[in-house]
Image (cartoon, rainbow, N blue to C red):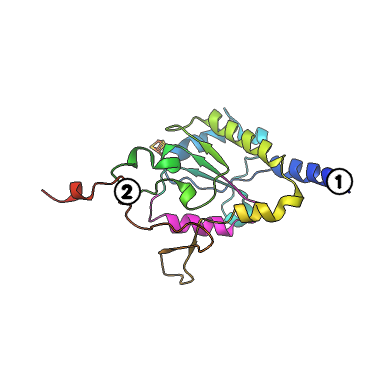
């Protein structure tokens, strides 16, 4: 039985890891590097990831290439939820990993996209070069090749969004998912000097 599962895992993982289709999603300047990676010089198609999809329903890789703002967060979660399983996230750039240069004094930037969705590979830099993105994709491919269908349930649990949207389509408020840590939404007061904003 184990021989059959190992063979199925090998073929399944080989197919998935060599055809990661990224979502066309570039919220800020890191996106330029992501676009460069798909141009002739760097040629992301060597790794089977040149098919940037315009719809999340055909994508299994989200590259969060840039600053994520609170206003954009609900759209990001909506897109992530619409991607079919199995799906992966590469957090590209300092802004998306920690808030970057906006970490201390911005009222609008999310301090880390992993507060919203689970991240598989962190790619630091400002901005990371296209080669670094290719390296992140190779790391993700290696990670996918270690997966097994026996751990499918565990995988699905680990890849749920960290927060969930309200059922009301017009509502932009993100509600805490009761299965995960409750996240304070809105202006983040931690590391943020509200007094400095008062007009002098
Ligand atoms: S990490 Fe640098 S290049 Fe990337 S979005 Fe932030 S400021 Fe722009």
Q: Is residue 85 visible?
A: no
Above or below 184: residue 90: above
Q: What x and y, as percent, mark residue 72? A: 41, 54
Q: Residue 160, can we see it?
A: yes
User: Going 43% across and 55% down the picture, which residue do you hit?
Assistant: 73
Q: Secondary structure at mark 1?
A: helix
Q: Tell which circle, 1 or 2, labels the residue nearer the N-terminal end.
A: 1
- Pick the front one: 157 or 99: 157
Q: Residue at x 63, y 46 (%)?
A: 21
Ligand 1 sits in quadrant? top left
The vertical placement of 133 against 120, above or below, is: above
Q: Residues within 10 Å of mark 2 (few under 14, many from 20)?
A: few
Q: Please provide the residue range marked out in magenta.
A: 69-89
State the image quarter where residue 142 is shown. top right
Q: Is residue 96 magenta?
A: no
Q: CA distance from mark 1 to mark 2?
A: 50 Å
Q: Residue at x 63, y 40 (%)?
A: 49
* Residue 190 image label: 2
Residue at horizontal 62 percent and vertical 40 percent from the top: 50
Of 180 and 187, the residue lying toward us? 180
Q: Which residue is mark 1?
A: 2
Label 1: how many Cα within 10 Å (few below 14, some 14–19, many 20+): few
Instruction: Residue 197 in the image: state x and y as whole percent.
Output: 19, 49
Mark 1 in CB contact with mark 2 (< 8 angstroms)? no
Of the pair 8 and 148, the residue shown nearer to us: 148
Q: How far across and how far down the image is residue 54, in percent?
A: 56, 52
């Amino acid at each position: 039985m184990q021989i059959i599962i190992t063979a199925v895992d090998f073929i399944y993982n080989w197919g998935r890891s060599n055809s990661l289709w990224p979502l066309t999603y570039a919220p800020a300047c890191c996106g330029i590097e992501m676009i460069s990676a798909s141009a002739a010089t760097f040629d992301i198609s060597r790794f089977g990831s040149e098919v940037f999809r315009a719809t999340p329903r055909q994508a299994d890789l989200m590259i969060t290439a840039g600053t994520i703002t609170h206003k954009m967060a609900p759209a990001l979660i909506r897109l992530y939820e619409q991607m079919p399983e199995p799906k992966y996230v590469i957090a590209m750039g300092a802004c998306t990993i920690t808030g970057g240069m906006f970490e201390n004094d911005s009222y609008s930037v999310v301090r880390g996209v992993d507060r919203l969705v689970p991240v598989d590979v962190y790619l630091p830099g400002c901005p990371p070069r296209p080669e670094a993105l290719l390296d992140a994709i190779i790391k993700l491919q290696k990670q996918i090749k270690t997966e097994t269908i026996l751990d499918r349930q565990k995988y699905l649990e680990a890849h749920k969004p960290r927060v969930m949207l309200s059922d009301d389509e017009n509502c932009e408020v993100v509600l805490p998912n009761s299965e995960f840590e409750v996240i304070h939404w809105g202006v983040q007061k931690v590391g943020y000097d509200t007094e400095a904003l008062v007009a002098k």
